[in-house]
């Protein structure tokens, strides 16, 4: 037999596509030709596979070998095709009967000694195979736990090419995936550790309940960073669909923690202020990798000292904040990554970072305006909650009466508010108030009475509030009503939402 075929999966972003790896062995000068839009890593597979086959005790066929990856119009990236190429090649040379691999997806990178090494993106690859009707996959032993989370797929693992050959030739059992180990209990920062800052705590609760973006402005030491780092502690755990999305993104980025279980806690990304545009939104040669805004999908993206970020990096966030996804185009192809994250900005009032109004502040009024002016109007217009925090008082810092609510208490209210919003917007396919399009909120049956929005409409007519800001205030008002257990916002809810939006809350 001079022809063989083995199934594999190729990734474009986080979307997997079933790929047929064909091998044809013909008479002629010994050579290996790979077609089907392979990248550099795939072109180098010919040398890795040859060394792995020989060092695994198999005979290398001295013939003209043509390897084709179907569909040929789909770009192929990475080294996950190595194991499938080796199996197809050995099958085409007559060394292996490939009937045991019929309808089986084979994934893995080969070392020169024949070891099978783990690869990135196994979770979305196996999920794509399952959607295509494949029920059996063979993966590297290092990816077995990760692949096993996909329901309805029988996962087996290999650590060497020799083990795969023994399975195909003699029926030697493959490695079973490890038993599922329960995730450790969440042990992170708690809201009870934040001294004072009732306004900041309220803003955080409203943001968590509705999925709203937040800007925290105030002097150093006021608790901006502490509040931002505790936002994930009051967010509910991710459901199955969201957990698969988040885990797939981390799998593609190679950031999945040991154990391979689904990520149930909302992710938290806090890049340094020297972060580049590609590190924030995604980039890299060939196919762009996900950036921090995508790795924070369904979680929190925290930009501390936001005015210190480059102007280009901040402005690059405007599109993903508006649409919940980011489309990246590169010479090697384009891809779309989800980016439905909650943005939290923190900023000092001036570059010297001394208490505002203090006699020791070295910044002129012009310098202060320029510093905060780095946060452009179009960017801030997409931030729902904008609050100014005051310095913490000594009495609040030294209080020991334990009257501060812990994260667990606040999380209970947030979960109830989110469930109310999910029930209300189920017909629209939305789960959070921040995800609802403005036109739906301005039309019956969701349109609020004129007496409830009179102040809000006055701000819009005077030009102190944009149309986007109008819609975002209405969404926040719905969130405040959900937190209070009411089915519709009233005038007080709209007023509080407007104060949180404009920074006038006290």
Image: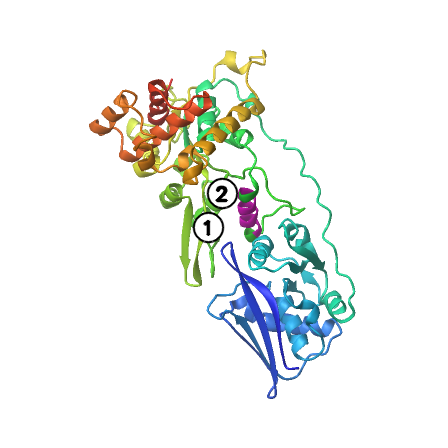
User: How was this image coloured?
Assistant: rainbow
Instruction: Find residue 153 and report its horizontal and vertical position in percent.
Output: 64, 55
Horizontal side, residue 228 vs residue 49: left or right: left
Assign a secondary structure to mark 1.
strand
Instruction: Find residue 69 and report its horizontal and vertical position in percent.
Output: 54, 71
Position of 369 relative to 151 (above/below): above
Residue lying at 55% horizontally and 53% vertically, measured from the top left: 252
Count of residue discs: 2
N-term-proximal mark, 1 vs 2: 2
- Residue 297: numbered disc: 2
The segment highlighted magenta reads: 242-251
| Front-most of residues 444 and 9 | 444
Q: Quadrant of the N terminus?
A: bottom right
Horizontal side, residue 43 vs residue 282: left or right: right
Position of 320 relative to 472 (above/below): below
Marks 1 and 2 close (CB-CB < 8 Å): yes
Q: What is the chief secondary structure element of the magenta stretch?
A: helix
Which residue position holds label 1? 337
Residue 250 painted magenta: yes
Please tell me how crowded label 1 is: few (under 14), some (14-19), or many (20+) other residues with Cα within 10 Å.
many
């Amino acid at each position: 037999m001079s022809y063989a075929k083995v199934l594999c999966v190729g990734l474009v972003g986080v979307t997997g596509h079933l790929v047929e790896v064909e091998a044809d062995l013909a008479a002629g000068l010994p050579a290996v030709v790979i077609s089907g839009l392979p990248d550099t890593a795939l072109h180098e597979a010919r040398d890795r596979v040859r060394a792995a086959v020989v060092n695994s005790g198999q005979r290398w066929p001295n013939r003209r070998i043509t390897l084709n990856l179907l569909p040929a119009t789909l770009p192929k990236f990475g080294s996950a095709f190595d194991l499938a190429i080796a199996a197809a090649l050995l099958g085409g040379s007559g060394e292996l009967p490939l009937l045991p691999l019929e309808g089986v997806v084979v994934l893995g990178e080969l070392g020169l000694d024949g070891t099978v090494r783990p690869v990135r993106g196994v979770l979305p690859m196996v999920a794509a195979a399952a959607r295509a009707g494949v029920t059996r996959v063979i993966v590297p032993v290092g990816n077995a736990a990760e692949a096993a989370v996909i329901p309805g797929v029988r996962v087996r693992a290999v650590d060497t090419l020799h083990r795969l050959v023994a399975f195909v030739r003699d029926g030697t059992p493959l490695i079973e995936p490890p038993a599922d180990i329960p995730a450790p209990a969440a042990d992170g920062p708690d809201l009870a550790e934040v001294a004072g800052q009732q306004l900041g705590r309220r803003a955080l609760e409203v943001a968590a309940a509705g999925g709203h973006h937040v800007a925290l402005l105030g002097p150093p030491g006021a608790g901006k960073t502490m509040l931002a780092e505790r936002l994930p502690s009051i967010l509910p755990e991710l459901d199955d669909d969201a957990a698969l999305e988040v885990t797939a993104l981390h799998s593609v980025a190679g950031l999945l923690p040991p154990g391979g279980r689904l990520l149930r806690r909302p992710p938290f990304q806090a890049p340094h202020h020297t972060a580049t545009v590609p590190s924030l939104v995604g980039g890299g040669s060939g196919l762009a990798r996900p950036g921090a805004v995508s790795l924070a999908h369904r979680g929190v993206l925290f930009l501390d000292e936001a005015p210190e970020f480059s102007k280009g990096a901040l402005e690059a966030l405007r599109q993903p904040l508006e649409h919940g996804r980011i489309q990246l185009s590169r010479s090697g192809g384009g891809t779309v990554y989800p980016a439905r994250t909650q943005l939290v900005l923190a900023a000092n009032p001036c570059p010297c970072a001394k208490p505002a109004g203090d006699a020791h502040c070295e910044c002129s009024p012009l310098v202060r305006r320029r510093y905060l002016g780095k946060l452009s109007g179009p960017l801030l217009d997409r931030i729902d909650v904008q609050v100014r925090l005051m310095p913490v008082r000594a009495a609040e810092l030294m209080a020991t009466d334990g009257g501060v609510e812990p994260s667990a208490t606040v999380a209970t209210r947030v979960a109830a508010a989110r469930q109310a919003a999910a029930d209300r917007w189920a017909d629209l396919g939305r789960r959070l108030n921040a995800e609802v399009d403005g036109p739906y909120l301005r039309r019956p049956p969701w349109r609020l009475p004129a007496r409830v929005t009179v102040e809000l409409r006055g701000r819009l007519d005077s030009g102190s509030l944009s149309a986007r800001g109008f819609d975002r205030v209405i969404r926040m008002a719905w969130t405040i009503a959900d937190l209070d257990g009411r089915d519709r916002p009233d005038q007080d809810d709209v007023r509080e939402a407007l104060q949180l939006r404009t920074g006038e809350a006290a």
